[in-house]
């Protein structure tokens, strides 16, 4: 027989929702997949990005696009151009511009290294991904050299050959 309690029992509090993987830093907020296809990525650097509040919230919602973005260095400062960050859904009339120029936060030594490299013919700065680290938005930028059409075909051939070799090894292990 069940025992009757004289005082009311509180229901268990609802469990907290798991944190969004983008906000937690477990997944990239935006990637530039075309960068690896169109450029040889030589060196990568991590840079902070000077953003407005609605831009950070839009990035958390996944409204960032780096496809046509590139970096420049002017007057000893690094900037990110053409990075599209869509309008925040709950923003007011003070929402940010989607394609504004954003400052990249780098150490002075890194800026000097990048200045020397980008002045070489054929090298440029390309953002490869946006992600969160300790609640801050970071941008991975790469010093890159453009690929010619035959370079792209050669890369595709090599990738296809590697894929076939892995498949052959997997078939060999099954039998």
Image: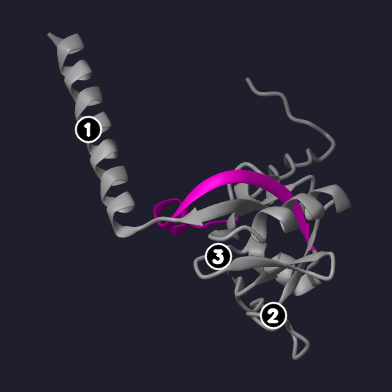
Q: Main secondary structure of the magenta part?
A: strand
Q: Is residue 149 left or right of residue 75?
A: left
User: What is the spatial separation of the Cα atoms under label 1 and label 2, in whole angstroms?
Assistant: 42 Å
Position of residue 41 relative to residue 48, above or below, is above
Query: Residue at position x 72%, y 48% from top?
Result: 46
Part of the protein shown in magenta: 29-49
Residue with the mark numbered 1: 161
Position of residue 80 relative to residue 93, above or below, is above
- Image quadrant where residue 115 sits: bottom right
Is label 1 in a helix, a strand or a loop? Answer: helix
Could you tell which of marks 3 and 2 lies nearer the N-terminus?
Answer: 3
Disc 3 packing (10 Å; few <14; some 14–19; many ≥20): many
Q: Tags 3 and 2 in contact by the CB under 8 Å rule?
A: no
How many numbered badges does the structure rendering display?
3
Residue with the mark numbered 3: 66
Query: Residue at position x 29%, y 38% from top?
Result: 159
């Amino acid at each position: 027989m069940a025992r009757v309690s004289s005082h009311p029992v509180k229901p268990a509090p609802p469990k907290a929702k798991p944190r969004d993987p983008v906000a937690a830093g477990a997944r990239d907020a935006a990637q530039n997949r075309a960068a690896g296809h169109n450029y040889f990525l030589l060196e990568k650097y991590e840079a902070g990005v000077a953003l407005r509040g609605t831009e950070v919230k839009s990035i958390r919602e996944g409204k960032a696009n780096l496809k046509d973005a590139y970096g420049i260095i002017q007057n000893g400062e690094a900037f990110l151009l053409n990075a599209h960050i869509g309008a925040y859904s709950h923003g007011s009339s003070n929402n940010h511009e989607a394609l504004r120029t954003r400052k990249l936060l780098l150490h002075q030594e890194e800026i000097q290294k990048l200045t020397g490299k980008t002045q070489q013919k054929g090298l440029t700065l390309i953002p490869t991904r946006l992600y969160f680290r300790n609640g801050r938005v970071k941008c991975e930028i790469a010093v890159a050299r453009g690929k010619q059409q035959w370079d792209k075909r050669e890369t595709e051939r090599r990738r296809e050959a590697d894929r076939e070799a892995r498949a052959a090894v997997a078939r060999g292990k099954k039998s």
